Image (cartoon, rainbow, N blue to C red):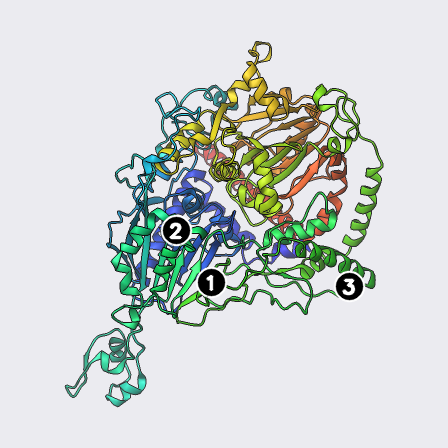
Amino acid sequence: MLLTKLLSPAKTFHSISQVLCNTCNMSGGTKVMQHAQNLKFQRVKLREKNMKYVPGIINLQVLGSGAYGAPKSLYLFTDQSRYLFNCGEGTQRLAHEHKMRLAKLDSIFITQPTWDNLGGLPGLALTIQDVGVPEITLHGPDGLEQIFVGTRRFVVLKNLSVITKECVAYDKYEDHIISVTYVPLVSSQDSSNGPTDTSSGSPPPTDDSEDDIDYYDYETNQSQTVSQANKKRRHHSPPSSRNDSSPTKRPTPSSPASTTMSYICQLKPRPGALSLDKCVAHNVPPGPLLGKLKAGQDVTLADGTVVRSADVTEPDEIGPVFIVLDCPDESYLDSLLKESIFARYQESAASPDDIAVLVAHFSPPHVLSHPRYKEFMSKFPSSTQHLILNESNHCLGSVAVHKIQCKLNVLNKHIFPMLCDNGIPVIVDKESPIPPTPAPTTPTESSTDPPPPSVPLSPSLQSLMTDLVTDLASHYSGLDSNSVLPSSSEPTLIQARTLMKIPLRPRLPLDTSPPLSLDIPAYVRETLTSSPEFPDALSALKQSLEQEEQTPHTNNNGNNINSNNSNVDNDRETVPSEERRKFPEVTFLGTGSSIPNKTRNTSSILLRIDRSSCMLLDCGEGTLSQLVRLFGPRQLDDILSQLGAIYISHLHADHHLGLISLIQARARVRSSSPTRKLVLLAPKQIITWLNLYSARFQRIGHLYTLVPLSLFENHGQNRPPLDQDTISLLSSLGLSSLTTCLVHHCPNAFGVALTTLSGHKITYSGDTMPCDGLVSIGKNSDLLIHEATHEDELEKEARLKMHSTVSQAIRIGRDMFAKHVLLTHFSQRYAKLPRLNRDLNENVGIAFDNMRISLSDLPKLKHFYPALKLMFAEYQDEIEVRAMKRNLKAEVKRNQKADVKRKLSIESAEGKR
C-alpha cells in the first residue's frame, strides 16, 4: 500500500534527481531567498495582467465573528485579490482551516489599534511571508506600524515589506477592484486620562531594558556551537540586519490612540457585456473589431460608419457600497453623528445606487444598543442589511477542533473532555433539521472536506455508535441555551458566523442558514471505521484503563498518588484525598510548534495547582480561544479569576503572542478586585515589547508584575536564597519551589521545575535541544513535559533549529529519573500524530490539544498509543510515504555527491599523468 502511494506521484526518480542536481550547491538561505524572489516576480506579473479586468464575482465573507475568544474579521475576496478588515488574534488559524488562501492578500484595514483588531497581524505576517506575498499594505489610524517595531525581535520579516498607508480623512485607497474612503471617528475623551503604568512594577523602557537580541541568530549562524551560543545568552547582540523589510514609518503617537477608522467601500463599476445581437444590428463583422468594442473602444466599419462601444454593450454594472464601522464606546458617538459623509449612503442618498447595501458593525453590544447609535442606524433604509461582529455572537469558527476532540473522546471522555463551544449547530442524526455545510461554489473558499465513503457497520458497532452519538449529543444539548442565536427583532440585523457569505457581485440574496455544522454521527462513524482492527483496540484500551484504576501508583517520593501526601505543609493536610487525586491537573491548550494549524495550536499549558489556583506555561496565539472552547465562558471566568501567574519560557512568537489577550481577559474578570496583579514569570527582555504596546496602543502595564526568570536560575551551591516576598509569592501560587535553568535554544530561553505545596514536581522544557541543566533541575520529577518537535530521522534538522527529537526527549526523561514523560510541541507536519520509530515506553505519553490529565492518570497514557495509531491509520500512512520520499531524495543527493567526488578524483589522477 505504501509502495503504491509512493510511486503514484508524477515526479519520477529521474525528475527528483534533476531537481537535486540543480540545487545541490545552493545553501538553504540562498534557496529560500531565490524562492521568495521567484514568487514575488510571479505575483507582480499576475497582478499586472489582472489589472486589465474587473472580476465578475466578489464576495464579502465573515472570517471571525467577534465572539468571546474569536477574532472579528471580514474577508473580501475575488479571483484576483483579497482584502482583510481587522485581524484579531486567531485570524490565521481560521483562514488556514477554512482554506481562505492568503497568497493574494493585498491590503489589511484596521478600524481601531487594539489587540482585538490587530493581535493576529504578527502571526499573519509570518504566514503570508512563507507563501510568497512580497508586500502588504496596512490602512488605519496612525501608529499601526509600531506593532511591527515592537515585535521585530521575535517576528522576523525577511522577505515581506509592510507598508503603512497614511489615512487622511476622506482620502481614498483605489485599485481596479475597489475604492475605500477613510472616515476617522474621534473620541470626545482625552486618552491621557486612562490609568498610567507607573505603578505596574514594570519599568519604562530604558537603555538597559531595550531588547536588541536576535532570537533567531542560531538560524543564520549554524556553524556556531551550542556552548558558544550559551555564552551569548546574557549579553545583547547587535540589531538584526534582517529587518530591512520593516514597515515604512509615520510619526509615532505618544499615547494610545483615541481615533478609530471607518471605511466606506465601493466596488468599481464592471463594464457591460458585449451584445452580439446589437453588433449584428449595427453590421459589425466578426473579427478584431468585436474585441475593441468589448474593451470600450469605438470602431469605424469599412463603409465609414462609426459604431460606439456604448451602442453595442450592456450598461455598466454599478458597484455596490458597503460600510465598515467601529464605534468602540459612547465617547465616539458625537463624532459619528456629526459625520456628514455617511448621509450620502443613507436613505437621503442622491441616487438609489449610492445607498449602502451593507453596514458591518464592529461596535460592541453596549454601543449597538445605545439610543444614539440606533438613531444613526435608523437613517439607512430597510434595504440596507446590518452585519454584527462583536461579543454578542457565539461562533468561534472551528469545526476541526470539535471533530478531533469527538474522535479522541471515544477513547476516554475524562482525559479528552468534550468542548463547551456552543456556537456551531450540531447534527445528531440524518433527520436533523440543520443541514450539513453546503459544497462551496467558486470562488467561495471553504474547509469542508469531502465525506468519507460510508462503511456498513456490524450490529455490535452500530449499537456502540448509537451509544456514543447519544452521549455526545447529550453533552451539546446540555450547554447554555445560546447555541442557536435568537432571531433579531429587526429583519435587517444579521449575527455574524464564520464563513457567512455576502454576495456583492453578482448581487444575490443573503443565505442566513448556518454555514458550519458539527456532524457528530459522521465523526463517530469515521472513528469506528478508521481501521478494521480499531474496534478490538478500543475494547482492549477500555479494559486496560479499568485495570489501571485498580492499581496503586506512587510518586517519586514513594507516596501513593491517590492518598494524602505526608510531605506537605500543615495548612494543606486537611485537603480531601479526592482533591489530591485530581490536582495538580495539566491541560494542554497548544501542542504544535511555530504556527497554529487546525488541530494543534501553538504552545500553551494550563497547570491547575489546586482547587483555587492555576498558572499557564507559555501562551501562544489563540490560547484564550482554546480556553473559551474547552471551558465555556462561565467556567472560564472562574479559571481566569484563579489565574495567578503566566510563565513564558522564551521570546519566540509561538510561545507568547497570546499574552496580551489573557492579561486583558483576566483584568475584565477581576475588575472587582484589581489589587491582585497577574504575576508574569518571563525573561526580563519581554518588558521592551510590553512597554511599547502599553505606550502606543492600550495601557496594560498596571495589570501585571514582571518577575524575571533569572531570579530563580539554578547556580548550584552559589544560588542566593530567595527573599521572603518571593517565597510568599510562590506560596500564593500553590508552589513550594520554582527553579529555572538556561536551555539550548535561543538567547534567554529557560526550562523550569515546579514543586507544588502538595509535594508534586513538574518540569517543563520549553524549546530546547537535549540539555544537562534541565536534567539537573528536573531530577526525580513526577512529570516531565518535554518538546519533541522532530522525528528521530530528522535529528540534523532538529539540531539546526535547536529542538529535540522524540528519542532525545525520552532520553532526557530517563536521565532525570522522571516518573512520566509527556511529549509536546510537535512540528506541524505531524498535525494528528507524531511519527515514532518504535512503540512508546511504559512511562511516555503524547499530548494533544484539549487533553486534560491529573498526575494520578498518567500511568494510563501508555495504553493509548495502539488505538491512536489505528484511529489515525490513514494519516500514519501519509507521513510514512513522506518519510520514504525524503529518504529517497537524501539517497539521490548522497549518490550525486559521491559521483562528483569520484569524477574529481578521476580528473585529478589524469592531471597528474
Amino acid type, residue under disc 1 in the picture: Ile
Which of disc 3 and disc 2 is earlier in sequence? Answer: 2
Where residue 766 sits: x, y (%)?
57, 31
Say which of 494 and 264 sits in front: 494
Where residue 710 sits: x, y (%)?
51, 20
Q: Residues within 10 Å of mark 3 (few under 14, many from 20)?
A: some
Say which of 174 and 221 sits in front: 174
Q: CA distance from mark 2 to mark 3?
A: 48 Å
Q: Would you say 381 lies left or right of 570 here?
A: left
**Pointer 2 and pointer 1: residues touching (CB < 8 Å)?**
no
Amino acid type, residue under disc 3 in the picture: Leu
Say which of 98 and 549 sits in front: 549
Looking at the rendered structure, the secondary structure element under dot 3 is loop
Q: Which mark is residue 457?
A: 3
Give the labeled residue for mark 2: 39
Q: Is residue 706 above or below residue 312?
A: above
Q: Which mark is residue 494?
A: 1
Q: Would you say 246 lies left or right of 724 here?
A: left
